[in-house]
Amino acid sequence: MLRIAIPNKGRLAEETRSLFDQAGLELVARGERALTASLGGVFEAILVRAEDIPEFVADGAADAGITGLDLIAESGRHLESLTDLGFGRCRLSVAATDTSGIREVADIPSGSRVATSFPRSTARFFASASIDVTLVPVSGAAEIAPHLGIADVIVDLVSTGSTLRVNGLHEVATILESSARVVIAGGDSEVSRPPDGRRRAIDDLVSALDSVICARGQRYLMANVHRDRLAEVQAILPGLNGPTVIDVMNGGDMVAVHAVVTAARIYRTISELRAIGAQGILVTRIERLVP
Ligand code: AMP
């Protein structure tokens, strides 16, 4: 049975679990503190810290893992990202105090002290900018470091930016845009070339997770319209491959049209369909969508 490493707590844990649930792979742990669980009886999950997942996958302790791109980059391990799951969005940014006068990276003088819990990514970034900095490693709350006088700038994760603002800091540069990824071992190691059957199982898993994510932004719409308005329906409802048209047993003048519509367009689509006399408009969520 393939082993998938998934985050046991933190920002990615809950969304990962609900994604697997919706893909039909319910996570059933053997106890409150169990470190392993069954994923729908198809995979074995190991429940570990998101930070440790790149190591476990690169070393072959897990066949695949779900973790943030920020942590993958920071691990320095060679991993292959199979898909972007779209949640856990944040960016790894350089920030300076509002009173520092620093507006862009070029304003950061060599010799500056940089507080961060991402030392590898930070070192890489400043090396490529040819700025010689001293790293001040912290395990969290880097925002406080400038106020304590132990750093001049920080490198930290930013989501809404409100933590920076309340601490009198502003973003100077983005090092990396992050979100949750499915990863497998990369490169030429034994671990990175799973036998065909295992690779197919991982590809099926990725396709199942993608199908849930793809479905979230879409709705299934059904409506009854007069047959002679079909040309207008086609303009309103492009659908995946154009709308499906089904006969309605009412003497032939009405047809049912079905189409997949992006959730963001539903409001406008309904009003356009009403304007051409559509009736019985029904909109439902889609559980999974494999385009
Ligand atoms: P915000 O105030 O929304 O910009 O969030 C910033 C704070 O949340 C910082 O302390 C970050 O370390 C933390 N943070 C934001 N996004 C993430 C993430 N995706 N994963 C872990 N920590 C995060």
Image (cartoon, rainbow, N blue to C red):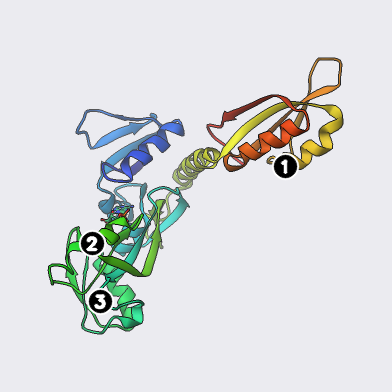
> Disc 3 residue type?
Ser
Determine whether the beta carbon of the residue marked 1 sits less than 8 angstroms from the nearest atom of ligand 1.
no
Separation (CA) of disc 1 from disc 3:
53 Å
Judged left or right of residue 168, residue 219 is right
- Mark 1: secondary structure: loop
> Disc 1 residue type?
Pro
Q: Quadrant of the N terminus?
A: top left
Q: Give the number of the mark in front: 1 or 3.
A: 3
Q: Are marks 3 and 2 in contact (CB under 8 Å)?
A: no
User: Can you see residue 244?
Assistant: yes
Say whether disc 3 or disc 2 marks the residue closer to the N-terminus. Answer: 3
User: Can you see residue 2?
Assistant: no
Task: Write down the residue under mark 1.
Answer: 238
- The residue carrying pointer 3 sits among few (fewer than 14), some (14 to 19) or many (20 or more) residues within 10 Å by Cα, namely few
Q: Residue at x 37, y 40 (%)?
A: 15
- Could you tell me residue 132's position as x and y percent? 25, 83
- Mark 2: secondary structure: loop
Task: Write down the residue under mark 2.
Answer: 167
- The residue carrying pointer 1 sits among few (fewer than 14), some (14 to 19) or many (20 or more) residues within 10 Å by Cα, namely few
Q: Which residue is at the front of the view, 27 or 161?
A: 161
Q: Quadrant of the C terminus?
A: top right
* The quarter of the displayed image where residue 267 is located: top right
Separation (CA) of disc 1 from disc 2:
48 Å
Separation (CA) of disc 3 from disc 2:
13 Å
- The answer to whether 44 is drawn above or below residue 171 in the figure is above
- The answer to whether 40 is drawn above or below residue 61 in the figure is above
Judged left or right of residue 5, residue 217 is right
Give the label on residue 100, or none. 3
- The answer to whether 3 is drawn above or below residue 252 in the figure is below
**In which of the image's four quarters is ligand 1 placed?**
bottom left
